Image (tube, helix red, strand yellow):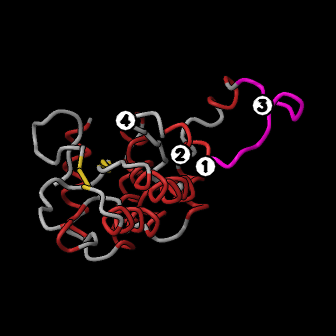
Amino acid sequence: MFERLNAMQREAVTLKSTLAVRDFWRQRRNESDGPTRALIEQVLAAAEAELGAYDEAVLHFPYGAPALREAAPALPTRETWRAVDAADTIAALAASRRIVLVNEAHHVAQTRALTLALLPRLRALGFTHFAAEGLDERDRDLAARGYPVDSSGIYVREPLYGEIIRTALRLGFVVVAYESATSGAGGRHWP
């Protein structure tokens, strides 16, 4: 299944615009079913997010809803929990740690806002490396250039993801690609 998706991705990256890429994935989604269709819907949603079509992206790939909603525990009540600023709280917890992991949804750009808010706080705490999924390890000039380009990775065209990379570089982080782009490296790879 991943080999088929990789072959489609090699074809998609030759297209000249994000609109063409979105249309390519729409057509492939309509031609597919089962697990392949679900993977294509995730890639399509990421392309829609690059275009700023965030509502469409979530509609095409709600990622587990309603299954996740059905299995989720009840939300906390006001009496048992209090709201706190996530970036401040995570930074306070990070002060006594050596590694911080932040998850995000590739097609929901709003989930990247937390990472963007955390970067300066983590740098002030002495964190030096920022590893990001979706960056291409073959872009050896990223740090010297100070900003990502199309060949820097598969998510860099989405505005918030691109800003995360630019901010990490501007703050002096060593930016590391942790997902291999090499064929045969295991898992998925992109050309």
Question: As displayed, is residue 97 above or below residue 112?
Answer: above
Which of the marked residues, 3 or 2, is nearer the chain's N terminus? 3
Kind of residue at disc 4: Arg
Which of the marked residues, 1 or 3, is nearer the chain's N terminus? 3
The residue positioned 19% from the left and 39% from the top of the image is 3
Counting the numbered discs, the total is 4
Quadrant of the rendering where the C terminus is positioned: bottom left
* Residue corresponding to mark 1: 88
Kind of residue at disc 3: Leu
Which residue is at the front of the view, 114 or 7?
114
Identify the disc placed on residue 75: 3
Which of the marked residues, 4 or 1, is nearer the chain's N terminus? 1
In 3D space, how far apart are the residues under numbered discs 3 and 2 (Cα atoms)? 24 Å
Write the start and end of the magenta stretch as one range: 73-87
* Residue corresponding to mark 4: 98
The residue positioned 62% from the left and 37% from the top of the image is 65
In 3D space, how far apart are the residues under numbered discs 4 and 1 (Cα atoms)? 17 Å
